[in-house]
Image (cartoon, helix red, strand yellow):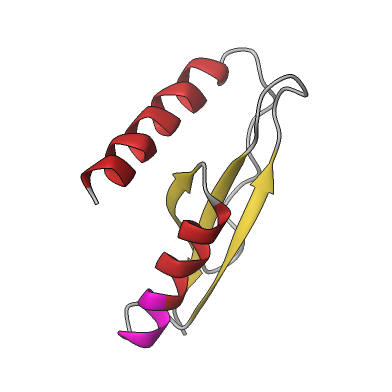
Amino acid sequence: MRARRWAAAVALAVVGLLGTTATPAAADPPGGTLRGVYYDGQFCNSYGSEGVQTGQWSWYYCEYRVYNPNNPGFYFLWTFTY
């Protein structure tokens, strides 16, 4: 689990560094909250599903974005509570 948290922290740092040169991320969807940025889509979906099952949020989706065609993209976990 520590490795995933470390990877998420590194991903956030990289996104922060790219923020000066990349196009800005879309604004939060209406009623949505950005919960995390991940390298692994399976982990993003697993974490989102776990949050629904435990009642932390009503539904979620993982949005995949590529900011540089020469680098892998990131998965943005959006959650919604209704």
What residue lies at 37% left-to-right and 86% top-to-bottom? Answer: 53
**Residue 63 higher or lower than 67, as above or below:** below
- Position of 11 with respect to 22 (left or right) is left
* The quadrant where residue 22 appears: top right
* The quadrant where residue 7 appears: top left
Q: Is residue 11 magenta?
A: no
What residue lies at 60% left-to-right and 65% top-to-bottom? Answer: 30
- Residue 40, horizontal then vertical, whole percent: 52, 48
- Residue 46, horizontal then vertical, whole percent: 45, 68
- Residue 52, horizontal then vertical, whole percent: 41, 82
**Residue 65 higher or lower than 12, as above or below:** below
Q: Pick out the residue farthest to the left.
A: 2
Q: Is residue 53 magenta?
A: yes
What residue lies at 30% left-to-right and 84% top-to-bottom? Answer: 54
Residue numbers of the magenta segment = 50-54
- Position of 69 with respect to 41 (left or right) is right
Q: Pick out the residue farthest to the right.
A: 69
* The quadrant where residue 23 appears: top right
**Residue 48 higher or lower than 52, as above or below:** above
- Residue 45, horizontal then vertical, whole percent: 52, 66
- Position of 24 with respect to 1 (left or right) is right
- In the image shown, does 68 or 16 lie closer to the viewer? 68
What residue lies at 49% left-to-right and 58% top-to-bottom? Answer: 44
> How many numbered badges does the structure rendering display?
0
Magenta segment, principal secondary structure? helix
